[in-house]
Image (cartoon, helix red, strand yellow):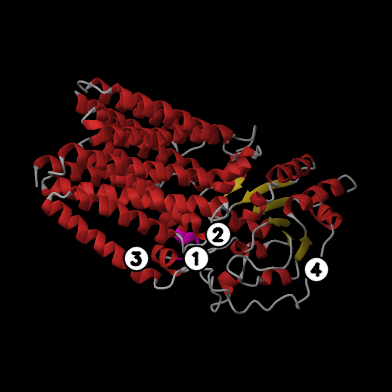
Amino acid sequence: MSAVFISGIVVFVLAAFVGLEVISKVPPTLHTPLMSGANAISGITIVGAVIAAGAGEGTFAAILGFLAVTAATINVVGGFLVTDRMLEMFKKKPGRG
Amino acid sequence: MTELLYLGAAVLFIFGLKQLSSPRTARRGNMLASIGMLVALVVTLANMEDIGWGPILAGLAVGGGVGAALALRVKMTSMPELVAAFNGFGGVASALVALAEIERTNSLFDTETGVVVALSLAIGSITFSGSFVAFGKLNGSLPGKPVLLPLGQPINAALALSAIGVATWAIMADEALGFWIVVAIALVLGVLAVIPIGGADMPVVISLLNSLSGVAAAMAGFIISNSALIIGGALVGAAGFILTVLMGEAMNRTIANVLFSGFGAVTAGPAAMSDKPVKRATPDDVAIALAYAENVIVVPGYGLAVAQAQHAVRELATILEERNVNVDYAIHPVAGRMPGHMNVLLAEADVPYDQLLDLDQSNPRFGQTDVVLIIGANDVVNPSARDDETSPIYGMPILEVDNAQTVVVVKRSLSPGFAGIDNPLFYQDGTMMLFSDGKAAVESVISAMANV
């Protein structure tokens, strides 16, 4: 295995543990926004999609790239917006707790 | 430098998720994560040479428009469908990235790249088709009941094995066709895996698909050696995994059991009920009980969301609070169709988040509660889960409402919940049954309050 690949695996494993640690502290009240927000983050694949779409190697690759960018952008834009919409509604009662 | 900027984007994701752990900072956290995404996108574009802008701009415009329209229009009750759909889009995007890589390189991969390409394709495709089946089940266009196929599990196992076989061949022989076959098998597998799962198990399924969409993104990150994708994908994979485990615990079931048992397809036997006497209540009885209570806890279930009763419940709570009655809400983890769904619905109805209690917060309080008002919940308040070892739901953590002085159950009829199990709570001494649609019931109690 190449060094790049192995360091990728190291990063993946460590990031997964960071994720487990950080996310296990999210209270049940926020689980839906957590999921839709995390969902938007999984749209980071937009980076790969843009590289594929912009490489311009033959029309078929460009079509695949276009579809990838579209799907990833739906995920990113929709995910962050809907999470914001939900979080805006979570308000504390004035004068309690 | 580029690498550091990608790392910066990933750090923003982590900070963003961290701030999601409190309702106070959550909105800012989401904002931080979206800035991280923008950074990653700009860095990528800045680093490309000879960019073919056409497909990129078209994709950003179409995707941005569709995503924004969906996000701004969706009703809060439909949130589970939307998240399912977004999971699917994330999955398919990662699979498409892998396909484009196959096109670009004529599938001349070294073994390790071949493996991550195959994984990205398989996981992305399963996430895509599985998510859209889940979407269909949640919005009612597919039957919500478990659809059990004959030989379902042997077929799925055979499909999974053949996908592994074909992928091995594709990697060894550098065959693009093989990778496409993997996509086809994975798409079928996603459908067959989710079809047998019942609507009530959807919280587990959506969480799992959420996790998979992250893993698919991480695999795409290995293909293009990009740390932002690997880290972002791993974070989402972890988030989905935690939620999957929590939902499974809340139903006292293992993930394997949810995925492979088709729970609810078999109608449980001992549903002989209805001959036992129950105490029927009128809206006036309920209004009196509530008005003279000190502490009231509302237990909302999915029935409340279906009846769109959350605003009426909030109105009732306001009236009670004006009479100095203390009102809180006890929310079981699987009360909605996705984790935390009920909390969002109540937040939408302007219920302050500090009144939303989870399982551990609410159970110690039922002993000091005068009236528990249950609307559209059944199995999650069924004492059999605690007391009756022969019950199919035995061991499932419940809201122990039977410790309260008076329990008011708003329900259409005495029909059992999704598990098809009788609920002894209904026949208990301190229980009153108000047979009605959730919203109509709460509204009639509100008008009865005027005379109390």
In the picture, the disc for residue B156 is 3
Q: Quadrant of residue B264?
A: bottom right
Q: Which residue is mark 1?
A: B147
Q: Which residue is mark 4?
A: B279
Kindly check if marks 4 and 1 are in contact, taking CB atoms under 8 A apart as contact.
no
Q: Which residue is mark 2?
A: B143
x, y (%) of residue B225? Answer: 19, 37
Which amino acid, by three-letter code, is at mark 4? Lys
* Label 4 – label 2 distance at C-alpha: 35 Å
State which chain disc 1 sits on. B
User: Considering only order in the chain, which callout, 1 or 4, is on the residue closer to the N terminus?
Assistant: 1
Which amino acid, by three-letter code, is at mark 1? Val
x, y (%) of residue B262? Answer: 47, 68
Disc 4 versus disc 2: nearer the observer: 2
Kindly check if marks 2 and 1 are in contact, taking CB atoms under 8 A apart as contact.
yes
Which residue is at 49% across, 40% downward?
Answer: A33
Task: Indicate the secondary structure of the residue bearing disc 4.
Answer: loop
State which chain disc 4 sits on. B
* Label 4 – label 1 distance at C-alpha: 37 Å
Q: Residues within 10 Å of mark 3 (few under 14, many from 20)?
A: some
Decide whether residue B362 is among the magenta residues.
Answer: no
* Label 3 – label 1 distance at C-alpha: 14 Å
* Label 2 – label 3 distance at C-alpha: 20 Å
Task: Indicate the secondary structure of the residue bearing disc 2.
Answer: loop
User: Considering only order in the chain, which callout, 1 or 3, is on the residue closer to the N terminus?
Assistant: 1
User: Considering only order in the chain, which callout, 2 or 4, is on the residue closer to the N terminus?
Assistant: 2
Q: Nearer the viewer, residue B77 or A49?
A: A49
